[in-house]
Image: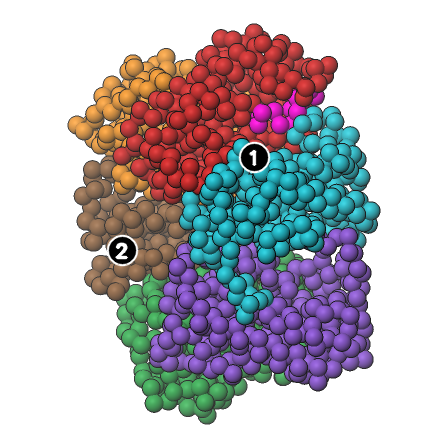
Chain colours: A green, B purple, C cyan, D red, E orange, F brown
Amino acid sequence: MRFHEMTWPLLRQVPRDRVVVVAPIAACEQHSWHLPTYTDTILVTGVAEGVEQRLPQEVLLLPTQWFGASHHHLRFGATLSASVDVHVDMLCDLLTPLLEDGYQRLLILNGHGGNIDTMQMALRRLQPNWQDRQLSAASYWDLAAQELAALAEGPRKSMGHACEFETSMVLALRPELVRREQIKNDPLPDEPVLRGLYVSEDMKQRTDHGAVGYPELASAEKGKKFLAAAIDRTAEVVQALLQRPLAK
Amino acid sequence: MRFHEMTWPLLRQVPRDRVVVVAPIAACEQHSWHLPTYTDTILVTGVAEGVEQRLPQEVLLLPTQWFGASHHHLRFGATLSASVDVHVDMLCDLLTPLLEDGYQRLLILNGHGGNIDTMQMALRRLQPNWQDRQLSAASYWDLAAQELAALAEGPRKSMGHACEFETSMVLALRPELVRREQIKNDPLPDEPVLRGLYVSEDMKQRTDHGAVGYPELASAEKGKKFLAAAIDRTAEVVQALLQRPLAK
Amino acid sequence: MRFHEMTWPLLRQVPRDRVVVVAPIAACEQHSWHLPTYTDTILVTGVAEGVEQRLPQEVLLLPTQWFGASHHHLRFGATLSASVDVHVDMLCDLLTPLLEDGYQRLLILNGHGGNIDTMQMALRRLQPNWQDRQLSAASYWDLAAQELAALAEGPRKSMGHACEFETSMVLALRPELVRREQIKNDPLPDEPVLRGLYVSEDMKQRTDHGAVGYPELASAEKGKKFLAAAIDRTAEVVQALLQRPLAK
Amino acid sequence: MRFHEMTWPLLRQVPRDRVVVVAPIAACEQHSWHLPTYTDTILVTGVAEGVEQRLPQEVLLLPTQWFGASHHHLRFGATLSASVDVHVDMLCDLLTPLLEDGYQRLLILNGHGGNIDTMQMALRRLQPNWQDRQLSAASYWDLAAQELAALAEGPRKSMGHACEFETSMVLALRPELVRREQIKNDPLPDEPVLRGLYVSEDMKQRTDHGAVGYPELASAEKGKKFLAAAIDRTAEVVQALLQRPLAK
Amino acid sequence: MRFHEMTWPLLRQVPRDRVVVVAPIAACEQHSWHLPTYTDTILVTGVAEGVEQRLPQEVLLLPTQWFGASHHHLRFGATLSASVDVHVDMLCDLLTPLLEDGYQRLLILNGHGGNIDTMQMALRRLQPNWQDRQLSAASYWDLAAQELAALAEGPRKSMGHACEFETSMVLALRPELVRREQIKNDPLPDEPVLRGLYVSEDMKQRTDHGAVGYPELASAEKGKKFLAAAIDRTAEVVQALLQRPLAK
Amino acid sequence: MRFHEMTWPLLRQVPRDRVVVVAPIAACEQHSWHLPTYTDTILVTGVAEGVEQRLPQEVLLLPTQWFGASHHHLRFGATLSASVDVHVDMLCDLLTPLLEDGYQRLLILNGHGGNIDTMQMALRRLQPNWQDRQLSAASYWDLAAQELAALAEGPRKSMGHACEFETSMVLALRPELVRREQIKNDPLPDEPVLRGLYVSEDMKQRTDHGAVGYPELASAEKGKKFLAAAIDRTAEVVQALLQRPLAK
């Protein structure tokens, strides 16, 4: 079910305790030389719509909130971004009317690395007041981390930015938006001694031209496999959430 | 030009002083018995894309921010809504990176009545720090008020909610989402003695089933005319803004 | 009744359901070459006190909050101003204790254009928590728009700033504060193509010396008529509000 | 000089370095059985205007901000009040345009005990950004503490609430607003062991009927003396501030 | 009892109505040439622990919050500081879980002058929601003002900064942290005409090298007496609070 | 070097570009039946002081900020906690004066799981304004994740709460505070299908008595090894940070 395509009478009939509300969030930001700024939005929407088609009775899909927390891309330009605090506020406001309207299970499905802190902050703000609900969040690449790693060909096995994963998936979904002739790898230097350390840097400090990974290895075919893996795992988690008892 | 479909190198080439950045904003909220919650988003996106197709070199179109200030619809349910304060914050954060990136002329193109206060508040917050830029905002029905009034058949000549105007335009753009059999007029009572007074009421206080106007008069054909009028006027304003000297 | 001149025992006896609490708000800001900064405060206080004298049992008048949202006048100097956000906060705090004390009907009576957004924002913040009360707001010139237009002699028929209307009314109420020798028209250029557009500009961008309109046409006699019209209409609205059933 | 009665051209001529801007702040709150809610505003305005008449070239007087931080009176009713945080915001916004307009010396003249914390907080917020200005604040009864103590007849020698001091001064300035037949002492119990301790209680917890002190001892004649003492001392401080070198 | 050294089962047994929760707060800031930045924390912790040892069943001691509101020391450097607003937020959050957990009596025990405004603001924010509790705060030198004045040898009889009092007490508690050879008096100029006036200045404006008072007179022996006086008086107040009926 | 034990003249001499400022942060919260609420503070302070002793010239150690973001423990009681937003504010204010005072490299050393989101949010807020500095953060158990896993005997190889790791280390540092007779394992149920999902639950929802892991396996001897591993790794990271070029 798609929240935004339904009327009020139809939405009133949705069983509050037998659906997972899926709220996709993403970004509109610089994506190296070759990908459109809407990459994260295209991809998480693709995953979310795939899950909704798979489980139309179990999923109530919201429209994708494309406005992400991307201040670490601002120095490159070509980026729209909410500050981290406004992003948290926005996510809290997005979920609160649904909680007040009785929905029991909510899943933020994330498609942008910069939203991880903010979506977790948002749920932490909400949790003390909604202890009888199921509040959850995930980046699709974390749900399918093992599967994606198994499919990747390049040396980087986890999601980067404008990388083998993202480039392949945009090639699968919106090939006309990819500037193939400008694809260029931009691997991060390895700093094993810093393992476990969070270093707060923006993309201009970390990368050369705004990619993190190996987009030269991308293909539309692989992109379809990546998407299928993400959809499979997300659908699996949605079904598990519906089985999981509500929090005490 | 569409910001979200462009890459970073393409966006760097956009002449900051010869485009109007158009930022459509809308809502996802209860729309009477017969219209989808995404009505405002569908309509303002339709207008904005029409303007961008008309003036592809003069307009830099952003993706539509569908998350609106709709707390006055919350008691009906079927509504996602930012509180007015978060909505102002969100709009300020949306425009700030564009101002910092040098764009000279910005137009918020609004498709939801509840956003009027907040978009004006946002521009008032930004204005003192960006006196050399052109900050503007309009609801498409205000730009084309005369034209829409001339085309309307019902007694209400200005935009309501789920009314003759909105229903006609959704019939023109996304007819499959309209539940025609449930269309029912819901006119507001007339209180001429209160002319000039702002009464703060939510939709449940003002209406019977969440419409304001005469949707029974709607038709797809009229919808196309309404949309054409809105696109014409908005394009005219965009061109006028490009001629207008920047603020001192 | 005047809230600020009454004692606690007297205020306890005011029937919460049979009065309209009238809260005048205004500004202290640059008013062209010839008017005192307190113009808006003098005028709305004059209107409000006139209404209270007309309807002493029906009106509970608060002291005028003279501190307005006037940042768009700051570049001229001679202006005290709350930022729009603080102004909204201040108005919410002003009304909340009255709501908690049981008053049923509140009317913000505004005398400054820059307060319109903020007073509406304030009521929108309050409304969801006070759905059984009557929350209303108006600029006195909007209540009496038709009457004032009929009385004006100059080409501008609606309230400007330091204009035919304001100058006449200050001449009627506080003539010693007007510097007549410095009165000079300052009409806004006409931009019909922009009809329906909100352009966010400060007064320095819009005007030459901080007036909007035709003060050279002002007279004390006309000022008395303007004031009488505003008082009449506001009193009429107060009486209508008392008849109007409370919101459901 | 009175800011609010002056025009823009006159205010431009005020020498920024040779005046003290005096900003009176007060409250509108419950004042026992016998005094009007506007008591604090009446009194501090009386003091401030007295100082301005004494030193018309040295003082630039603002209109009194009557909206005070009076939440500790709310349970009695008959009180308008800003929360402490909004009050601090409001005071910061009140002073900032004056600082930006070049005024060197500012004095908040306070007439309400509940504003002491907030005015000091406001100056602490402003100070780091305006280190070259003179930011000061005082309650008039603290400036004239010795003089008032010497004049008082009752056992309480410092300002209370609706007490010998306040009642006398309202009798001097606005006798028609005092309900003499309802005057009744309401002394606070003595707790010497708690000396030096701040106990956060509201007025309902601390007093019987909202007075702190001995209003039965009040007289208009004494009120005139109290006012004269407060005006003398405030004028003396204003002159001292003008001599005092600006902060480094 | 020490909150932080206890386990959950032990804390559950603490009788909520028969203890005073003591929350020491302090600072880490420049302290002239000779004292460590942790001076305020060392001293208030010394006092608080002394009281806890004296009254182990009556006091539930929290760990000292050393992060104070010290922006007025920042220009000297060697200072960690919360802005006044964050400090208020932090104190409110510190006390709220204790109130929610049922503790009846709370005493903020302060060791830094810059925290006085903020701790009072915090209690004023909390008070309206916790009217049945005892919310109190004090700087230890205010509780023992008479006793400390009687013990001081120098001309300054009240607490300054890095002064006879503070230096003596650090000499008593942590002598190895005092750089005796750099002790130098730094008396404030006397401005008797300004009595009763709050002038907002930072330490760099007020002092030469960041002391206020007569540290050259300090001795460890006197420090022990000062500490004993502060502990005695604080213990006396704690006992009085336990006797005092809860607020209505 | 320890910031809080130094005087102003000593701190002025610290070479801003050749030290890492280490800011330990922790919590005071429920820790199962057997550990004191101060556990996280004791442990991270132990690690941080160990590092400072190892590298006294390279480390400028701040006092441990023990007030953590522990709202997810509040329902158990025995917890002091800042809301996530106040915690972010507090961390920003903690670091800002150090950045303004010229320190180039900052490391937040964390000892409480609930602070991870907030410390990352704080650095993200600061980063856009301090792009030429090195802003980093880590939980000590993440820096030493491999080493701790290798030393653990129980089936849980990563840090839990009141677990084998924490209990062992408190036994090593403050054995008198551990209630050994009450130690009881409290393993989390395994939900492999949810891998990659963030579920927002409080401790009461996740655990039986507030432990996560296998404290029955704890020993002081192992605790010493855990601490040594954490100190080794943190010291190694500090040295690597000093070698790492500053951000562009």
Instruction: Where is residue C192? Give x, y as percent.
Output: 55, 67
Residue D177 in picture, x, y percent from top left: 67, 21
- Res E178 quadrant in image: top left
Image quadrant where one finds the C terminus of chain B: bottom left
Residue C244 location, x and y as percent? 81, 49
**Residue placed at 50% from the left, 68% from the top?**
B107
Q: Answer yes or no: are tags 1 and 2 on the same subunit.
A: no
Nearer the observer, D165 or E202: D165
| Spot occupied by residue A66 in the image (x, y as percentages of width and height) | 51, 72
Comparing F158 with E76, the one in front is: E76
> Dot 2 falls on which chain?
F
Q: As drawn, is A129 to the left or to the right of A151?
A: right
Find residue F105 and name its label. Answer: 2
Disc 1 crowd rating (10 Å Cα; few below 14, some 14-19, many 20+) is some
Front-most of B246 and C217? C217
E230 up-or-down from C195: above or below: above
**Foreground: F34 or C134?**
C134
Which residue: 35% across, 25% down?
D241
Instruction: Identify the magenta region.
Output: D31-42
Look at label 2 and name its amino acid: Arg
The residue shown at (28%, 73%) is A190
- Residue C175: mark in rendering: 1
The answer to whether one can see residue C123 in this image is no
Q: Residues within 10 Å of mark 2 (few under 14, many from 20)?
A: many
